[in-house]
Image (tube, rainbow, N blue to C red):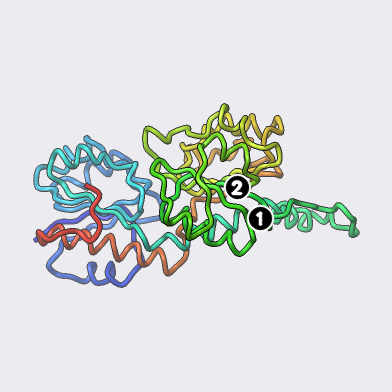
Amino acid sequence: MPRVFVTRELPGDLFAALRADVDFELEIWPGDFPPPQDDLLERVRGVDGIVCLITDRIDEAVLEAAGPQLRVVSQMAVGVDNVDVAACTARGIAVGNTPGVLTETTADLVWALILATARRVVESAAFVERGDWRTWGPLLMAGVDVHDRTLGIVGFGAIGQAVARRAQGFGMRTLYWNRTPRPERAAELGAQLRRLDQLLAESDFVSLNVALNEETRHLIDAEALAKMLPHAILINTARGPIVEESALIEALRAGTIGGAGLDVTEVEPVDPASPLLRMDNVIVLPHIGSASLATRAKMADIAVANLRAALADQPLPHRVN
C-alpha cells in the first residue's frame, strides 16, 4: 500500500477521494502552517509520495530522509523553486507541478494591483476608515491613469500573455521582454518586443511574470530600477526574489519609481517591520495570485492526479523533469 505525506490539508474533489481511498496510507500535516523542517524530515521517512506546497523546502536532506522508495514529489504550484529538481532527477523521482489552471486567475490579480496602485484604492480606503474624509477636493487622492498608457511585461509566457490580452481593453501600448521572442503571439496581442532596459525606460507599468531561477534572481536590482520612469509602478506577482527588495525600498524612498504592487516578497511572510508596509504608494498582498476557490481546487486536483499517475507507473499529466 503506497504511503503518502501531504504537507497541508487541500481542497478539491480528487483530494477528498484520495483521503477516502483505502488503497493509500495518507498522512496530512494539520493546521495552517507548514511542517517545520525537522518534522518534515521525520514524516517523510518511508513514504512513496510527497504532495507539497511552495512553503515546503524539498531538498537533498528530505529526499535522503524519505529513502529510496520515494517515487514522486507532487507540488501544488507552477513554480518549483522550493524543490531540488536536479536531486530528484538524479534519484529517479518524478516532480509534478500544476500549470495552466492558474493563468487567468493570476492575470486578474496583476490587473487588480495595476488598478489599485494607479488609483490609490487601498490608500483611499484607509483615508476614509481613519475618518480623514471631510470634504471633496480637486486633487483628493488623485492617482494616475491606466488607459492609453504603456505596459511593460517581463516574461511573455502564459500569464504574461493573459496580462497583455487584458491590456487591449484599456487601449494600452504593450511592450514585452522574453528570453525567447514570441512574434506570433505578440502580433496577436499587439505587443512589441524590447530589450529589458528599453522596456523599463518606456513603461508606465512594469509587470513581472518570469519564473524564479538563478538567471532571474534579482533581475530587478538597483541598476534596473534606475532605468524606470519616475512615475512608473512595478507589479510583481511572480516570485519575490526576482526583485532585490532593499534596492526597491531605496528606489521608492528616493522617488526613483512611483510605486509598487507586490503579491510576493523576497522573504515570505513579509517582516511586519518592513518599510514597504509603511509606504502609501505600495500595496503588499499575502501571495494570493492563484487564490480563487475554483483555481485552488483545480490545482489540488492536478497535484493529486500527478501523484496517482506516478504511483501507478503512468506518465504524469504535468511533469517538470
Question: Label 2 vs label 1: CA separation?
Answer: 8 Å
Q: Quadrant of the N terminus?
A: bottom left
Residue type beneath disc 1: Ala
- Badge 1 marks a residue whose secondary structure is helix
> 2 and 234: which one is in front?
234
Query: x and y percent of residue 152 in the render?
Result: 56, 46
- Left or right position of 8 against 142: left
Check the image and report above or below for 10 versus 57. below
- Badge 2 marks a residue whose secondary structure is strand
Question: How many dots with numbers?
Answer: 2
Q: Name the residue located 68 percent from the left edge and 32 percent from the top edge.
A: 256
Check the image and report above or below for 255 versus 277. above
- Which residue position holds label 2? 261
Q: Name the residue located 73 percent from the left edge and 57 percent from the top edge.
A: 125
Instruction: Tell me the quarter of the picture where residue 36 sits.
Output: top left
Check the image and report above or below for 105 versus 82. below
- Left or right position of 195 against 119: left
> 141 and 54: which one is in front?
141
Tell me which label, 2 or 1, sits earlier in the chain: 1
> 157 and 286: which one is in front?
157
Query: x and y percent of residue 15 in the render?
Result: 28, 67
Q: Are marks 2 and 1 in contact (CB under 8 Å)?
A: yes
Residue type beneath disc 2: Gly
Mark number for residue 116? 1
> 230 and 295: which one is in front?
230
